[in-house]
Image: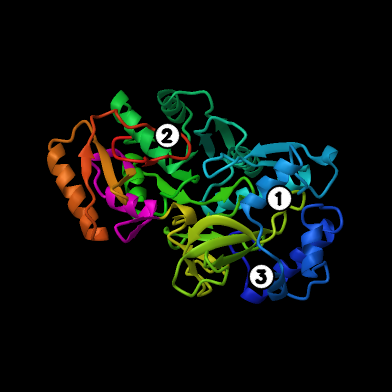
Amino acid sequence: MTALQGHPDRASLTALQIASLRSLLGALIPNNRFYTPRLSAAGLDASIPDLETFRARMPFTRKQDLVADQSAHPPYGTNLTYPLERYTRFHQTSGTTGTPLRWLDTPESWDALVDTWVEVYRASGVTPGDCIFFAFSFGPFLGFWTAFDAGQRLGCLCIPGGGMSSTARLRTILDNHVSVLCCTPTYALRLGEVAAEEGISLASNPVRRILVAGEPGASIPATRARIEALWPGATLYDHHGMTETGPVSIPCPARPDVLHVLESRFLPEVIVPATGCPVPAGESGELVLTTLHRTASPLLRYRTGDLVRPCYSAPCACGRYDLALEGGILGRVDNMVIVRGVNLHPTAVESVVRQFPEVAEFRVELYRERSMQEIKLHIEPVPECRDPEGLVSQVEKALRAAFNLRFPVELVPPGTLPRFELKARRWIYRESEDA
């Protein structure tokens, strides 16, 4: 059975999950000082009868629980299943949603993460012999390193892009006939923009697959179309993961706006954030994950903060029984804002703005005026835009039609707004409009 075939039915997948969960709990008790008391209080051990019992009894793990544990037991906390000398890998979260977390792995847990990333490549059509370019500055964030090691394990030529300018990266991609590009959606757009600025033609570029993660984008049709237009001949593939869990999902080969959670490696749930109850069919909720194979530094019922819309009908059109997430990662649960009674998610705004190829970059400002939450959009037109004022009017109309909300749009000169290599920070919060 190959990774792309998945499992023949739901029953076999569930059987694998309960066997993996029993093995995991057996390894944690009594060795893991973070989870052993939690499991004991919940009356859970390696003899757990079924997944329903686990979900009903095991409390959620929250990021603040882990932060508090690492603060009380520096530097790594107590969520370590083995003696410290067995750990060989150090990684750290980006800190964009709060205090960074330090994460350690043994060689065995690292191998499990790399194997999972190999599945991401296979689902994206990457094969041995492909040449992969990694457009990242390699720091302590886990995603770069797992992707690089997995590319080597698959049999690909892997080129690190750390310490290079965007122009140098483009030259390296073209000179080395790179067939696969790994980066964030924002940086794929930026590379296309730099190519135009520098007169570097991408009309016959060798890249055939662009794998993106780190932020929503590839599952937004307008953003996906914009990137693929900048990179003729290339297909965009989405996936997601995090330092705490490793790679989580793969792109659906039949539906480009769907991600599949790799349920052979994770036990997923989707809950109503306010209640913790399972989300009703057709609605969005918070993704909760239990890592079944990262035994050295596990997570049990971890509230990821990622907003998703699950599709429970199976099998999928691609034949997989793994949980399907429609629209990929829709955003962060805590990123929704309410403006004059209208709920706004960053991905929903981006899906409107990216419909206009004349918009090179944008930024959203939130501020308070007379105790009311207000919003404003800054757009930077591409240099060749012939009617910037007309563009402002078109974007304002599109936003009003999408959200039934007055959404002021202002122009900024070309080159004004920041560009991002990693996670973009386009939403700015101010105390007042003049702050």
Q: Residue at x 22, y 46 (%)?
A: 408
Q: Which residue is nearer to you in this view: 263 or 55?
A: 55
Can the viewer see residue 23?
no
The crowd level at tag 2 (other Cα within 10 Å; few <14, some 14-19, many 20+) is: some
Which amino acid type is shown beneath numbered disc 3? Leu
Q: Residue at x 42, y 48 (%)?
A: 236
- Are the residues at dot 2 and dot 1 in contact (C-beta closer than 8 Å)? no
Q: Is residue 244 above or below residue 387?
A: below
Residue 194: quadrant of the picture: top left
Task: Please tell me which of labels 3 and 2 falls first in the chain.
Answer: 3
The crowd level at tag 1 (other Cα within 10 Å; few <14, some 14-19, many 20+) is: some
**Residue named by callout 2:** 420
**Whole-percent x and y of residue 83?**
85, 43
- Are the residues at dot 3 and dot 2 in contact (C-beta closer than 8 Å)? no
Q: Which residue is nearer to you in this view: 365 or 207?
A: 365
Which amino acid type is shown beneath numbered disc 2? Phe
Which of pointers 2 and 1 indicates the residue nearer the eye? 2
**Whole-percent x and y of residue 1?**
66, 63
Q: Which residue is nearer to you in this view: 214 or 63?
A: 63
Which amino acid type is shown beneath numbered disc 1? Ala
Task: Please tell me which of labels 3 and 1 falls first in the chain.
Answer: 3
Q: Is residue 429 left or right of residue 245?
A: left
Magenta segment range?
337-364
Q: Is residue 101 above or below residue 278?
A: above
**Residue named by callout 1:** 112
**Residue named by callout 3:** 13
